Amino acid sequence: MKHLYLLPLLLLVSCIASNKDAISRYDEIVNALDNDSLSAKHQQLLKETRVADSITTLSDDFFAKWQKVSEDLASQHINPTVDSLYQRAFDYIYNGNYPYIVISPSVTVSIYDAEYSKGDYSYKSHIVSERRYLPHLRKDKPVLYLFESVNNQLSSYLGGINDDTGNSINRKRAVQLNQYIEVNYGHWGGYWHLASMPIIFEISVFRNGVWVALRDSWHTGQTVFMPNDSDDIQSIDRWIE
């Protein structure tokens, strides 16, 4: 009977310990984010990065060059904490089977001095910082960065984009490119998704966990939450275009 009286106390102690672990994890992440963010200069250099002057045909040589430029970049601006969070969210969704994985060369990471609670948006007034980082993935296939120049060139190569030329989609080229990387036409038309799904937009760090906003198909997306006091990962919100 005495043990029954102790049960609420034990639960309280366990809850306090769990909360301390979550806060400790938050402090650990926040401290780690002080390093290796992309400066405005680095972000501009990424925008100016080119793999080829133009794309008139696809070849293994083009992808070899793209891989070389990506690997050279991947040796820089390494933040293991950002990469770990990015990898967990990516692996939670990814099920592609293409020779290459394509990701954005930058991801926004925001820190909030608040706890996350679904439906409560008051955390937005407690933002501490917002920085951009170069994400890195550890996979058993080459990872390419979707530089702005490559995205624009491949989109023009495929056709069907919102520009002044009024060119139509070249389906033969789309099928050919799809043999190398994942290719999705935008839900609203006039643009292409050339990065592998999921496309991770933002990582937000809260006192009780981390949520990641991402696109998981050509017309859907979701937010996943990773609590600081466990190894769980949960889908907490979904959207559809």
Image (tube, helix red, strand yellow):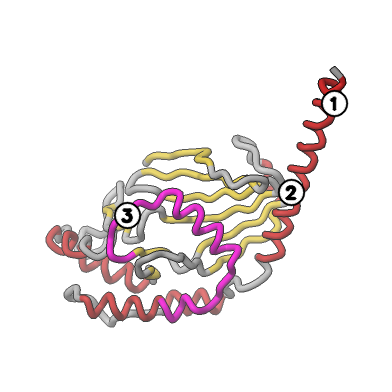
Mark 3 and mark 1: span between their CA atoms?
51 Å
| Label 3 with label 2: CB-CB less than 8 Å | no
Query: In terms of depth relative to the viewer, which is nearer, 98 or 51?
Result: 98
> Circle 1 — which element?
helix
What residue is shown with label 2? Answer: 21
What residue lies at 49% left-to-right and 76% top-to-bottom? 44
Mark 1 and mark 2: span between their CA atoms?
23 Å
Residue 206 shown left or right of residue 240 in the figure:
right
Sooner in the amino-acid sequence: mark 3 or mark 1: 1
Where is residue 210 drawn, in percent x and y?
61, 50
Q: Quadrant of residue 154?
A: bottom left
Decide whether residue 111 is among the magenta residues.
Answer: no
Residue situated furthest top in the rendering? 1
Q: Amino acid at mark 3?
A: Gly
What residue is shown with label 1? Answer: 6
> Circle 3 — which element?
loop
Which of pointers 1 and 2 indicates the residue nearer the eye? Answer: 1
What residue is shown with label 3? Answer: 96
What residue lies at 38% left-to-right and 68% top-to-bottom? 143
Where, quadrant-wise, is the C terminus in this rendering?
top left
Which of pointers 3 and 1 indicates the residue nearer the eye? Answer: 1
Q: Amino acid at mark 1?
A: Leu
Counting labels gives: 3
Q: Residues within 10 Å of mark 3 (few under 14, many from 20)?
A: few
Where is residue 20 drawn, in percent x and y?
78, 47
> Circle 2 — which element?
helix
Write the start and end of the magenta stretch as one range.
71-100
